[in-house]
Image (cartoon, coloured by chain):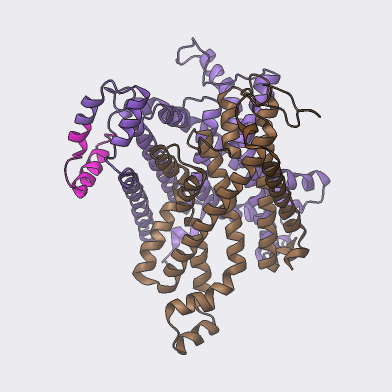
Amino acid sequence: MLLRNRKFLLGASIILAMVIVGIVGTLLTQPELRRTGSFPVRLPPGPGGLLGTDALGRSVAIQLSEAILQSLQVGLIAATLGTFLGALIGFVSGYFGKAVDAILRTLTDVFLSVPSLLFLILIASLVKGVGVQAVAIIIGAFAWASPARQSRAQVLSLKERTFVKLSRLSGMSSLEIIFVELMPNMLQWLGANFVNAFLAAVLAEAGLSLLGLGPQREMTLGMMIYWALSYGAILQNLWWWWLVPVLTLMCLFLALYLVHLGLDEVSNPRLAARG
Amino acid sequence: MAAYLRYLSTRAVLWLVTMFISATVVFIVPHLVPGNPLSSVFSRLAAVGGSLNARELIEQYTKMFGLDRPLWQQYLSFLAQLARGNLGYSISSFPSHVSDVVLPSIPWTIGLLSVTTIFSWVLGSVIGAVVGWSGGRSPLFQALVPVALVLYTVPYYIVALILVFLFAFRWQIFPLSGAYSVGLRPELSLTFALDVLHHATLPALSIIVVSLGWWFLSMRSLITTQKGEDYILLAEATGLPDRHILWRYAFRNALLPQATGLALSLGHIVGGAIITEVIFSYPGLGWVIYNAIKSLDFPVIQGSVLLLVVAVATTNFIIDLAYPLIDPRIRQAGRE
């Protein structure tokens, strides 16, 4: 079903291609080539120079292969954390209802309406200089609101179905019902949510990095743009330095969006029928 | 009227709760970092060699926020200071208050954001309605959809970078950065106004181009679903002119979810605009935050974050207030 969806296939293959480029590029380069001054500075892209070099004598291609993997890692960690937290909060809120629901729903509404980037800025500026994983965890910790609201709605509609009522009558505990009966019914839907959170996390990481709050000692797509901008790559006409990460980010966003659309159509066949 | 008041009061409560919870998060976060909430900032500041007035500053802060007292008392005094509009002192320009640093930037951010958001929302909705109503028969309309999809997935700042490169660096039609030319004094004159417009064009364009795509797509699909509704069929059967049905019937109904969409994505827009300001060195709140990050001025970051939260929450509240104007059901709820 999923493998016959064109949008999903196209998006997934773009991401797969990126991963391969990242892994192959990282495996092929000796560590000492990553240092500044390993190459002549400001080399334009071409047959000899691949994607060119930056003003510090680093190869853009080597940076890119490292950055792709790290940015994807941020997305993976943050989306996993955010979706898991969100699903948990949404489940509890939707399943138990009453006061628990009222409190959690208000919290969700608040965190949905307030730009989470602001809280991320606040935290990141206190723990400045942390690594990729830490940035990912901080992003994930604020990515739960949207999956929480949606999984709550899902639980509310599933809760009233006969099979759930039946399992409650047969004496299953709440936790058992959540994990055995409700979860499997929501997996595909959670997948679409995960991809959404992934996209948002990569976006947030790039945003934080551009503000100077990214993982300073490591390379991500956002950090690549940050370094290019802080050395005035645009004004020096080193277009390959900033354009390469920018285009890669655009491709990644588009690929993730296509995967999201594909998952949506598969888990919600009415959408596909509408075209 | 009673229904409207009840609606109003629940919205007002949510508005206050949002600001209260955000202020609480802003208070708690520094405490999650080990050590004195300020000490980590000061130690790093000392490493940079910028802590000229550090001791005096620490004393002022300790006194003002009662850092030697138990946590709950600190929290209460934090809220009390906030309620009075006191955001504390800036570290990098010490004797001045955070509000002195932050306030001058607010008009720039509000100006840029309100104009671009309203403009792209209206324009995107209108184009989306026309395209959705026509059912995408012309090839031009069909081509618009993938273009909008691509634009919608791209963040503001990437469009901003490309615009800077093309229009400010390559062709030099618009200035690279700033909100007005160096040497020009802010005043109410035509020269200054034109200069501001000239500087605001690229930042505004980068926000408009991206958000236009989304408003277009969502209005297009809303109108498409409206088209199948019974009331539209009835209107068509009575022989009303096509244009009348679109704008008086379908469009008005589609405006409701479109307004909800605006309220929901406000936070997203503000987040993106902060970074757009950084790319254009546009002297709004985003630029203030960026500079505060560079100079490790945590109180200024905190104050700007709080101000933006309040701004977003308040705008959402205002949209909520306007909701009954477009939705008679809210006005008349409870009458039956």
Residue A130 location in percent, x, y?
Answer: 45, 41
| Extreme residue in the bottom direction | A170
| Extreme residue in the top direction | B183
Instruction: Please state, as top left, top right, bottom left or bottom right, where the C terminus of chain B lies in the image.
Output: bottom left
Tell whether B57 sits left or right of A187.
left
**Residue visible at 45% across and 12% down in the picture:** B185
Supply the letter of whichever chain is brown: A
**Residue visible at 22% across and 33% down in the picture:** B61
Q: Quadrant of residue A1?
A: bottom right
Which span of residues is magenta-colored?
A: B61-87
| A197 up-or-down from B69: above or below | below
Tell whether B76 sits left or right of A228.
left
Supply the letter of whichever chain is purple: B
Residue B271 location in percent, x, y?
Answer: 50, 40
Asked if residue B149 shows in the view, the reply is no
Instruction: Please state, as top left, top right, bottom left or bottom right, where the N terminus of chain B lies in the image.
Output: bottom left
Residue B74 location in percent, x, y?
Answer: 21, 44
**Residue visible at 52% across and 44% down in the picture:** A132
**Residue visible at 48% across and 79% down in the picture:** A177
| A275 up-or-down from A168: above or below | above
